[in-house]
């Protein structure tokens, strides 16, 4: 059975919740929620993404907001613990950002959540 994520593990800002709910409303498939995942690579050694999912695995961790359910697998949770997902900007510049990412070593060392290295 999946377990609940706490504020200490993952939070979504109100704008992020709203945008995720809007995107979920545009999908005609039967989805469980939005899966946040980590993949090797990127500036901090790990990059993150999000996708719609119709599967909820027994070992998944779930954060159930009123309008959206966020799902994280155990391997991703190790990299994302303490992260806040926000939605910033508008028009073509609008994007989700992951705040409070912990550096995992390697990479260029000065990456921020905005996705660039200086």
Image (cartoon, rainbow, N blue to C red):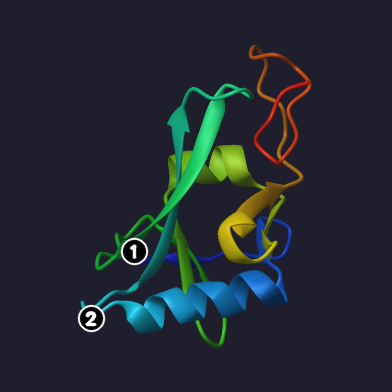
Q: Secondary structure at mark 2?
A: loop
Badge 2 or badge 1: first in the primary sequence:
2
Q: Crowding near pointer 1: few (<14 within 10 Å), some, many (20+)?
A: some
Residue closer to the observer: 63 or 34: 34
- Asked if one can make out residue 85 in the rendered structure from this viewpoint, the answer is yes
Residue closer to the observer: 53 or 24: 24
* Residue in view at x 70 percent, y 41 percent: 114
According to the picture, the residue beneath numbered tag 1 turns out to be 52
Q: Which mark is residue 60?
A: none
Expressed as whole percent of the image width and height from the top left, the position of residue 117 reads: 72, 23
* Residue in view at x 31 percent, y 60 percent: 58
Expressed as whole percent of the image width and height from the top left, the position of residue 69 reads: 47, 74
As drawn, which residue projects farthest toward the bottom? 66
Left or right of 8, for residue 46 = left
According to the picture, the residue beneath numbered tag 2 turns out to be 28
Expressed as whole percent of the image width and height from the top left, the position of residue 26 reads: 34, 80
Q: Crowding near pointer 2: few (<14 within 10 Å), some, many (20+)?
A: few
Residue closer to the observer: 71 or 61: 71
Residue 115's place in the image compared with 73, above or below, is above
Left or right of 13, for residue 30 = left
Q: Secondary structure at mark 1?
A: strand
Mark 2 vs mark 1, CA separation in Å: 11 Å
């Amino acid at each position: 059975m999946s377990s609940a994520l706490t504020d200490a593990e993952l939070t979504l800002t109100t704008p992020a919740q709203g945008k995720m709910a809007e995107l979920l409303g545009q999908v005609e498939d039967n989805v469980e929620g939005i899966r946040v995942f980590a993949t090797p690579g990127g500036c901090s050694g790990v990059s993150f993404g999000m996708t719609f999912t119709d599967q909820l695995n027994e070992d998944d961790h779930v954060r159930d907001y009123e309008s959206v359910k966020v799902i994280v697998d155990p391997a991703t949770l190790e990299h994302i613990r303490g992260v806040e997902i926000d939605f910033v900007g508008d028009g073509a510049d609008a994007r989700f950002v992951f705040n409070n990412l912990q550096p995992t070593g390697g990479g260029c060392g000065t990456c921020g959540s905005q996705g660039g290295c200086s």
